[in-house]
Image: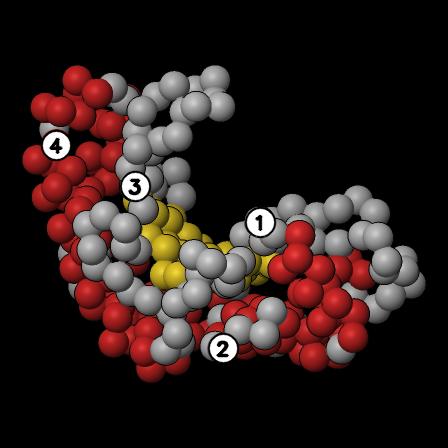
Amino acid sequence: MFTISTFHFLNELAQNNSRAWFAQNAWRYETLVCEPALNFIEAMAPKLREFAPHFQADARKTGGSLLRIFRDTRFSHDKTPYKTNIGLLFRHAQGKDIHAPSYYLHIANEECFLGAGCWHPGSHALQMIRTQIADSPDNWLKIRDDEKFLTDWKLAGASLTRPPRGFSAEQPAIEDIKRKDFVAVATLTPNDVTSPAFAELVAKRFASATPLVNYLCRAQQIRY
């Protein structure tokens, strides 16, 4: 289980983001981040199978749902070597081969949140999603404006300033067709994260995003 000590570790890492400090505190990373994260992933596996059977809770330490703590600094002015957040990504079984939707958990001192949907989909996937909305805007709007969905989630991400090529400005739901990301975000608190019932809370929130994620799968002809 994540504890307040997990947040303390992330805060100290942000203030001492160096390989030397991390080497001295690697045991804390293992104890306060890796172990609770992998335990959480294991707890999520049967819950995901209930409502999203093609999405994977992979509890491997490397190559699974727990994202690497090492930053890719090759093209960044910021050369600090480590991320100061915990990221868990529950990918579609085909997710490494296509731009499938996913479920995501982000834990940091600055903010904690859940994500569901397609973040930065490729051009082909984006075109398929936009075409699906244009062809059946009422179906999309029903999902987007559903009260149960809006209780926990809000759509986020970047958008174009003008309609994409091939879509009219008069098209219903054009503001959504202009989106470059089709992702929803649900905020969490540190108390949520450290609760013994955290896995149950996350599963419930993810399940309430099922209509959105299912829609995005169908738009790309992927099984949900």
Q: How busy is the neighbourhood of tag 3: few (under 14 within 10 Å), some, or many (20 plus)? A: some
Q: Quadrant of the N terminus?
A: bottom left
Give me the disc on residue 206. Answer: none
Does dot 3 land on a helix, a strand or a loop? Answer: loop
Does dot 2 land on a helix, a strand or a loop? Answer: loop
Mark 1 residue type: His
Q: Position of residue 189 (x, y in %)?
A: 35, 52
Q: Nearer the viewer, mark 2 or mark 4?
A: 2
Q: Position of residue 218 (x, y in %)?
A: 59, 76
Location of residue 51 with respect to 89 vertically, above or below: below
Q: Is residue 161 something one can see in this rendering?
A: yes
Give me the disc on residue 120. Answer: 1
- Name the residue tied to disc 3: 68
Q: Is residue 215 something one can see in this rendering?
A: no
Quarter residue 207 falls in: bottom left
- Name the residue tied to disc 4: 26
- Name the residue tied to disc 2: 223
Q: Is residue 130 left or right of residue 27?
A: right
Does dot 4 land on a helix, a strand or a loop? Answer: helix
Circle nearer the N terminus (2, 1) = 1
Q: Position of residue 197 (x, y in %)?
A: 23, 67
Mark 3 residue type: Arg
Of 124 and 13, the residue lying toward us: 124
How far is disc 2 from disc 4 in space, using C-alphas? Answer: 40 Å
Circle nearer the N terminus (3, 2) = 3
Give the residue at x 84% y 53%: 165
Mark 4 residue type: Ala
